[in-house]
Image (cartoon, helix red, strand yellow):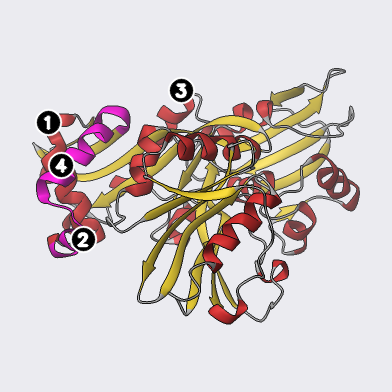
Amino acid sequence: MLPNEIRKNLKIRKLSIENIEQFNALLKYSFQVSMGELSSIGWSENGIKKSKSPILKKATVFGWFDKNQLISQICIYPMTVNIFGTMYKMGGVTGVGTYPEYAGNGLMLELMKKSLQVMKRKGQTISFLYPYSIPYYRKKGWEIVSDKMTYTIKDTQLPKRHDVPGMVKRVRENSLDLKRLHNEFAMYRHGAILRYNLEWDEYWRWEGDDILVAIYYDVNNKPTGYLVYYLVDEIFKIKEFVYLTQEARHGLWNYISAHFSMINKVQGLNYTNEPLAFLLEDSEISESIEPYIMARIVDFEGFIKKFPFKDVSSRTLHFVIDDPIMECNNGNFSVTWDDDENVVITKGGTEGELVKASIQTLVAMFMGYKRPTYLARIERLEANKRTLTYLEKIIPNEQPYFSDYF
């Protein structure tokens, strides 16, 4: 515990551009990023300051100060995420850090509470973050909602060429076609975020100058798929592989296979939560899976009012929720639907069929990462069989795609 004379000097306040030096210093300390590592990918001290300056203008950053010294911080990016075809305002949490001499005193918990309250006021009913500790964030109400798969394909296992009418072109990383194509993809792909300037800045932030981008254009010169990749040590390394059509998928694999004489294997990242092996003629490839992004429902009422339920009836569900931070989410909620299938939610209502769960279990369910029946089977959700069948029916069944890092 901090001595009382130190604790009374601590104040929470919003950071501004004048705090950029302290913001960067705490960020580098927390994540143990050395200037040597940054220099190896082309970053200078001044370059970091310039790149982070817009963030302090566009994002909301709160910190604890000991007098005028920043000692703990949290950053919220304003983002938009596709949840089963409905666009949600999302608070992307990043830049979380506390100097070790101040750790263990509940400072970050207070920053999280304040940040979540601000998100709620701004209508950001869901929050995403990349976890440095899954158990830590689970205790705060976040849960895993998407995985990252890594695969390795030998050069002899590359797919056979498919004739396609379009062609692949290499483009610059700031290509307007790339940006438009990603957002077209994100508009129909559950779990993906729309990328604007802030999101693209984060996407490229730690990439080196040798990053490459290739776009597949169909016969009408419409961009329908893209690759972000590296060529290093005779390996074709895929950062992201996106396509709107199967034609584009084949065209991009044709492009990868055209590097046959230059590479001995392909290594890639896959965020679809579906193994790649089934799509290949030779499926004996190496694939691994690890949890990637976490999310939490910030405001249950606001989130559920927009949720795109399907095939609903006039039945009523009685949610009993436990949330370790947001008091507004704790307790009883009755959820039903009117004749136009609009959600009607009553806080404090106890009518309907029981659905009892923590806020982190509910985000895994409503994001489609885990199904209701599975969550009940592992005792993360309490509901009878009839209610589980109804939940299975009304919650769309699609795995989230999330490929961003911030």
CA distance separating discs 2 and 4:
14 Å
Identity, as a three-letter code, of the amino acid under mark 2: Val
CA distance separating discs 1 and 4:
11 Å
**Residue 380 appears in view:** yes
* Badge 2 density bin: few <14, some 14–19, many ≥20, Cα 10 Å: few
Q: Magenta segment range?
A: 36-60
- Identify the disc placed on residue 33: 2
**Residue 290 appears in view:** no
**Mark 3 = which residue?**
121
Of helix, strand and loop, which one carries label 1? helix
Q: Earlier in the sequence, mark 1 or mark 4?
A: 1
Of the pair 312 and 214, the residue shown nearer to us:
214
Q: Is residue 77 left or right of residue 286?
A: left
Identity, as a three-letter code, of the amino acid under mark 4: Lys
Q: Residue 55 magenta-drawn?
A: yes
Q: Earlier in the sequence, mark 2 or mark 4?
A: 2
**Mark 4 = which residue?**
49
CA distance separating discs 3 and 4:
30 Å
